[in-house]
Amino acid sequence: MTERRQAGPRCAALVGPYLSGKTTLLEHLLHACGATQRRGTIKDKNTVGDFSPEARARQMSVELNVASAEYLGESWTFLDCPGSIELAQDGYNALLVADVAVVVVEPIAERMRAAGPLLKFLDEREIPHMIFVNKLDDATSPVRAVLEALQAVSARPLVLRQVPLQDGEEVTGYVDLVSERAYRYKPGEKSDLIAIPDTEKEGERSARQQLLESLADLDDGLLEKLLEDTVPPTGEIYALLTRSLQSDRVVPVFLGAAEKDSGVRRLLKALRHETPEVRSAAARMGIDAARGEPIAHVFKTVHMPHTGKLSLARIWRGEFADGMQVNGERLSGLSRMTGQQQARLAKAGPGMVVGFGRLEKVKTGDAVTPSGKVPAGLSPWPDPALAVYGMAMRAENRNDEMKLSQTVAKLCEEDGSLRVEYNADTHEMVLWGQGEIQLQIAADRLRTRHHLAVKMQPPQVPYMETIKRATTQHARHKKQSGGHGQFGDVHIAIKPLPRGSGFAFEDRVVGGAVPRQFIPSVEEGVREYLKRGPLGFAVVDLAVALTDGQYHAVDSSDMAFKTAARLAMSEGMAKCEPVLLEPILKIAVAAPGEFTANVHRLITGRRGQILGFEPREGWAGWDETKCYLPQKEMSDMIVELRSLTTGVGTFHWAFDHLQELTGRHADEVVQRRQRAAAAQ
């Protein structure tokens, strides 16, 4: 491999499905760079990344880990991203600012589907990426089967760069298919150069020919050489591979076992020689890295307990210094991150990943400039994933309710895939996200970072009620207790309205039977009653008309007529055949086509009504099923859906209409509401 000139600071994102071994790979990359004296392990809870109590308690990445290192005189930032589908937002944000992505997967062909959404994200945005097949020592599938499964979910051609050498079941080294050199692994050291074993020569030649043929599809010069049976120079192949990676036309595939330090240095060398410089990633985001004022992009926000808000950003152009004015605020602190350690900087330049201190107005996705202006042509920051799972949340100590609202807002700023909703119908604060694990982590952070204990439970379904028949009702409120009494007399007509009409009030009084000044009080009394009808829920889709009444010149008042109206509603509504209304959602469920039958069974098993299905636009081999589903049945639907679709199924939803609910389900709902009311 030819030597290359020194590059400026570069950034690589480590992404991949849960349990693929990204954090272990990060530890070995840092050790190979000389950034750490020893390699930490997840089991021993001493890794550079995954340092938070939430991560160590679960022995998994629950947030973005940032680590800085130097390798052969060049500056690198590694972004280790959570693998759980529920925590994917950090990974997608990191990929937008990275120069290259390393997609880490296990050598299990059946699990490659889980990498599909991630590879699609990379392909759509033309982000250069390579694949590292990790845990090769524990492989359950041949490398060829793994490649075939990966190619099925990748829009770019995959190019195998190595073939493994084995001694029985043990992977002892590899053959580099470009240089045609063989190496034996030496944990913690550079691999030894060895002769290619005779037993591997035929397989190596076949694999190398496949590599060359894949590259020839992209280069006419190489194609001519192959047709003429001319062996292309090694340097030419490396150069073509580098150009093809940097333009995101091929995806190189490397092999190894990070836990045993196998293949890590080969991966690191490939990153050094083939990763593009920062100007390429800047251009991808619509930024000219050569001209204009300094600009950086915030890709992660963290609220630290003692130091305040920290905005992690990639600098695209120019230089930032501690204390300078950006976006209308003073930059209070500039740092370079390695795990939980922050190294203070006086200034930082293009390519660096830094922490900006206390930019209170800046959000994830914002561009940061001295003028505060967003440059023309800047690519829009993608919207976060839509929420699919919610839990009602309240502080254990009622005095902490205000603090809870403020602190949850910070959690939502840290992770854009979280959002909080205040439900006026159920009087609950509901935290929405991507799944149960994500919300549990949020609750743990409230407790460990902010000393705020919370209780979480499934949110109430906002049932409503309405009526099926009309009636008229007379009610009088009369009270005498010395001095002025109270007197209000009303006649009302109640009738149902079409679904979705809401509530209408009409004044039909003639001849001044009820003075004009008291009519708004009658409407107010009716509306107060509608907050809780005969079944215990808010009442909708009905009309109430005031038709007649009486008043007393001295004893009538606003309060008297409001009370009379509530009495009339209470007595009249029981005669109107009240019926429960259930909220129905319109849901679009997306999953690979082989799981469509499973999806349909899931929907019908939850009282859903399938409206139809069709190929998912832009997703080869995926279907999208549209259906109506009772909101009650959505609460844990994402959990079962992911279980049925190897973790990749998802859906988006919106409220559609209210629908009558009768029978056993309705009786159970009403009884629960009555028990809850009695317990208050």
Image (spheres, rainbow, N blue to C red):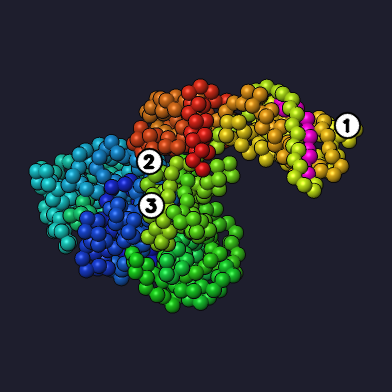
The three-letter code of the residue at mark 2 reads Gly
Question: Dot 2, how many residues are within 10 Å of its Cα: few (below 14), some (14-19), or many (20+)?
Answer: many
Q: CA distance from mark 3 to mark 2?
A: 25 Å
Mark 3, mark 2: which one is toward the viewer?
Answer: 3
Q: Nearer the viewer, residue 156 or 661?
A: 661
| Residue contact at pointers 1 and 2, CB within 8 angstroms | no
Q: Residue at x 59, y 26 (%)?
A: 579
Specify the amino acid type for callout 1.
Answer: Val
Whether residue 220 is situated above or below residue 572 in the rendered picture: below
Tag 3's secondary structure?
helix
For disc 1, the marked residue is 510
The answer to whether residue 625 is left or right of residue 160 is: right
x then y, percent, for residue 608 = 48, 26
**Residue 466, relative to residue 304: is it above or below?**
above
Labels 1 and 3: the sequence-earlier one: 3
How far apart are labels 1 and 2 at the CA level? 70 Å
Residue 657 visible in image: no
The mark nearer the N terminus, 1 or 2, is 2
Q: Residue at x 42, y 62 (%)?
A: 450
Q: Amino acid at mark 3?
A: Ile
- The answer to which of 41 and 186 lies nearer the viewer is 41
Q: What are the residue bounds of the magenta stretch?
A: 485-495
User: Can you identify the residue that label 3 sits on?
Assistant: 441
x then y, percent, for residue 279: 46, 62
Instruction: Indicate whether residue 631 is drawn in magenta.
Output: no
Q: Where's residue 73, x and y in %?
A: 30, 70
Residue labelled with disc 2? 116
Mark 3 or mark 2: name the one nearer the start of the chain. Answer: 2
Instruction: Tell me: 545 left or right of 111.
Output: right
SS class of the residue under badge 1?
Answer: loop
Q: Residue at x 40, y 75 (%)?
A: 344
Q: CA distance from mark 1 to mark 3?
A: 63 Å
